[in-house]
Amino acid sequence: MAHSVSTNGRLSPWTGRRASAGNTRLRLLVVDDNPNSAYALVAYLSLEDIECSVAFGGKEAVASAITHDPHVVLMDISMPECNGYEAARALRRHPRTRDVVIVAHTALDERDVRREQNDDDFDGYLQKGDSPRRVVAMLHMLAQ
């Protein structure tokens, strides 16, 4: 159930996949090769009662997601060694993480990300530099 690209700045999930946190805190894995960016976002999201962990690249993201079972992965795209597309595809192939919600969080344009991804690599998109409130709003949209 793919949604169209947002042309008016509204948040719009790309798939019907949703995280099921139940009565537990939402567990989020923030993936970014820039530690300052990752920790700044985690600091804000922790104030929103979201349990955050961090990975500093695609390979680390895959290993961390398999071990820590996040509800949502916020994935940078442009990373050395293993980029966000490769990491998302690896997560989709693994039985423990195939259904995890993955949101592209990148400076790349939304249309470019949609063009480069496979069928369901990502469940949504957030532009880096967006307000942390938009990140929280997208996370709430994707969590049941």
Image (cartoon, rainbow, N blue to C red):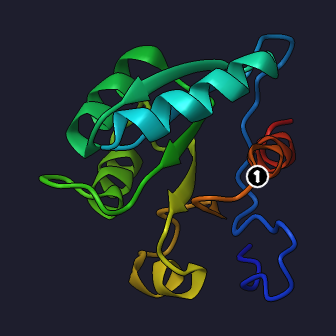
Q: Are there few (<14), some (14-19), or many (20+) residues within 10 Å of tag 1?
A: few
Q: Residue at x 25, y 32 (%)?
A: 60
Q: Quick check: 17 above or below 5?
A: above
Q: Is residue 122 rendered to the left or right of residue 21?
A: left
| Residue 58 percent location from the top left of the image | 27, 45
Foreground: 20 or 60? 60
Q: Is residue 74 rendered to the left or right of residue 76?
A: right
Image quarter (top left, top right, bottom left or bottom right) of the C terminus: top right
**Kind of residue indicated by mark 1:** Ser
| Residue 140 percent location from the top left of the image | 85, 40
Total numbered labels placed on residues in the image: 1
Q: Indicate the quadrant where residue 40 lies.
A: top right
Residue at the top extreme?
Answer: 24
Q: Quick check: 99 above or below 114?
A: above
Q: Residue at x 60, y 34 (%)?
A: 41
Q: Residue at x 70, y 27 (%)?
A: 44
Image quarter (top left, top right, bottom left or bottom right) of the N terminus: bottom right
Foreground: 115 or 44? 44
Q: Is residue 23 rendered to the left or right of residue 20?
A: right
Q: Quick check: 53 above or below 87?
A: above
Q: Residue at x 70, y 69 (%)?
A: 14
Foreground: 20 or 109? 109
Q: Which residue is mark 1?
A: 131
| Residue 133 percent location from the top left of the image | 83, 45
Foreground: 94 or 68? 68
| Residue 56 percent location from the top left of the image | 30, 35
SS at mark 1 in the image: loop
